Structures are given as structure tokens and as C-alpha cells.
Image (cartoon, rainbow, N blue to C red):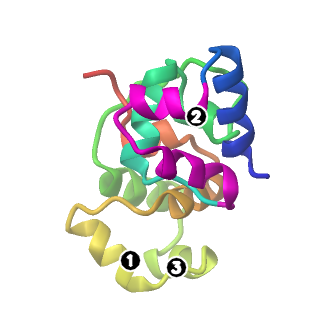
Amino acid sequence: MNDFQERLIELLQDNNLTKQKFANNINKSFSTINEYFLNDYYPQISVAIIIAKYFKVSLDYLFGLSDEKINTNKETGKFFDKFNALVKINNKSILKTMNDMNFNESNYYRWKKGLIPKTYNLLTIAKYFNVGLDFLVGNVDD
């Protein structure tokens, strides 16, 4: 079981929610929610943000990167800009950084076009740079 699954189970239990009721509350299908429990499967980051907002927790808490439930780091900005800044701060090249994380260089160019990495890749990046998911995706209240 991964950290996300453990935290989601905990949040459902703390809020006396069944998977079905939770799925209904966030307008997702039961099969989608159940998939998170059956496999080592992460939601798309857009769905993870919905889940985090629903439970009023940070993405970092939801994925086990922090034990702090509330995100206090409300920095905004685009993922690509933040990624480049982290590479620069760590005095590494883009190619070296991508290789260190076993990412294809083509991912970098997709991010440059505005695409957000898949959740698993975001977790890898967050751990590599020792930053939070909320920071990477600019998870702020609307």
C-alpha cells in the first residue's frame, strides 16, 4: 500500500465516508475511486487537487510527503518555471536533472508547452528537489 492509499483510507474513515459516498461527493465514479485502493495507482494531479481541497488538506499530506495537513506554502506560479528555478538553484543542467530522475528529455519539452507531469513523476520531482507537491503545482485556493 502506498502513502496516498493510506492517507485516503484515513481521511475516509475520519469523515465517516464510504468510497461510494466520497465518489458521489466529488463527482467521480466509484470505479475511479476504487481503483486507487485496488492497485498501486495514483490519481491525475487534477483529481488529487480535488481530493485535497475536499478534505481541506495539502497535496503533500495526501501523498505522505508531510504530516502537516494544512498547506502553508501558498506560492503560485507555473510548474515549468518552478522546475527550471529548482534546477538552477541546484546548479545542475536540465539534461543531468532529467537523467538523474530517469525522465526522457521529451518530457521537459512537454512541460515547456504547459503540460503538468503525471502524479508519479511529480512525486519523483518533489522528492528529488526536496520540495512539496503543493509548491510544484501552485496549489492555491481559488
**How far separated are the C-alphas under marks 2 and 1?**
34 Å
Three-letter amino acid code of the residue under disc 3: Phe
Give yes or no for residue 125 being in the magenta stretch.
no
Q: Position of residue 119 (x, y in %)?
A: 50, 57
In the image, which residues are magenta? 18-40
Relative to 136, residue 53 above or below: above
- The dot on residue 25 is none
**Residue at position x 45%, y 62% from top?**
118
- Relative to 132, 115 lies left or right: left
Q: Quarter-wise, where is residue 77 in the image?
A: top left
Three-letter amino acid code of the residue under disc 1: Asn
Image label count: 3
- The dot on residue 19 is 2
Depth check, mark 2 against mark 1: the one in front is 2
According to the picture, the residue beneath numbered tag 3 turns out to be 103
**How far separated are the C-alphas under marks 3 and 1?**
7 Å
**Residue at position x 63%, y 42% from top?**
63
Question: Looking at this rendering, what residue extends furthest in the left direction?
Answer: 113
- Relative to 47, 15 lies left or right: right
Relative to 106, residue 116 above or below: above
- The dot on residue 107 is 1
**Residue at position x 61%, y 35% from top?**
62
In the image, 70 versus 87, the foreground residue is 70
In the image, 25 versus 102, the foreground residue is 25
Give yes or no for residue 29 being in the magenta stretch.
yes
